[in-house]
Image: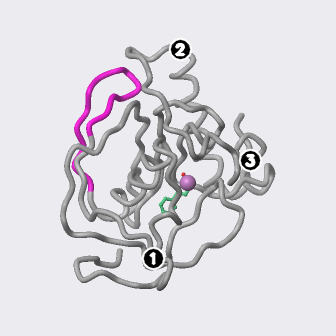
Amino acid sequence: MITMDQIVREGHPSLRAKAKDVDLPPSKEDIDLLNDMLTFLKNSQDDEIAEKYKLRSGVGIAAPQLGIEKRLIVIHYLDEDDQEHTYQLINPKIISHSVQQSYLQGGEGCLSVDRAVEGYVHRYARITVKAYNIDGEEVKLKLRGYTAIVFQHEIDHLNGIMFFDHINEENPFFVPEQSKAV
Ligand code: SB7
Ligand code: NI
């Protein structure tokens, strides 16, 4: 079971590395890892389990956050209508994006960052992602809103980019004209 002990923190080289493509079809090892990552997210969102194992709640995780430099991401959250959004993806790639940007009003955090970093993280408002699912099948996803933001946070981890790299240094709360709050 993945706990916070396995999550690498700021300063670990895997967070600044470019992760490697994963061979297809995925190996049992990579499938097991994607499933362990999903279990971690579900556990982190379960009040009792999170309290027992001292897990910080997370909606996404990328393999480099476990010190594993592979292009694997998992996203799991329930939206305001209690709809599940669950993705376990291999080699995800943004193949197109909007000009319009968006940002989370409350800013972003990261399981690998043990401090609050204030400021807006401007991202693309809409993205199209090509990836492979856990069965090794190609999928193409059109994403917007909160989901698009979380995807960009996770895909950034595969490229050694941290959320605070996107915050305006002079004015952390600067809002470009084409950026809308989510
Ligand atoms: C806010 C939080 C996340 C993504 C986008 C906005 C996920 C935080 C958990 N992680 O550190 C995942 O990399
Ligand atoms: Ni993160």
Residue for badge 1: 168
Residue 133 drawn in magenta? yes
SS at badge 3: helix
**Which of the image's four quarters has the C terminus?**
bottom left
Quadrant of the rendered image containing residue 89: top left
**Viewer-proximal residue among 178 and 160:** 160
Q: Are marks 1 and 2 in contact (CB under 8 Å)?
A: no
SS at badge 2: helix
Mark 2 residue type: Lys
* Residue 171 place in picture, x, y as percent: 47, 85
**Which of the image's four quarters has the N terminus?**
top right
Q: Residue at x 81, y 52 (%)?
A: 52
Residue 41 drawn in magenta? no
Crowding at dot 2, Cα within 10 Å, few <14 / some 14-19 / many 20+, comes out as few
Residue 89 lies left or right of residue 66; in this view the side is: left
Name the dominant secondary structure of the magenta segment.
Answer: strand
Q: Is mark 1 within 8 Å of ligand 1?
A: no
Q: Is mark 3 within 8 Å of ligand 1?
A: no
Q: Are marks 1 and 3 in contact (CB under 8 Å)?
A: no
Q: Are marks 2 and 3 in contact (CB under 8 Å)?
A: no
Mark 1 residue type: Asn
Q: Residue at x 28, y 45 (%)?
A: 94
* Residue 30 place in picture, x, y as percent: 53, 22
Residue for badge 3: 4
**Viewer-proximal residue among 69 and 135:** 69
Q: Residue at x 22, y 48 (%)?
A: 128
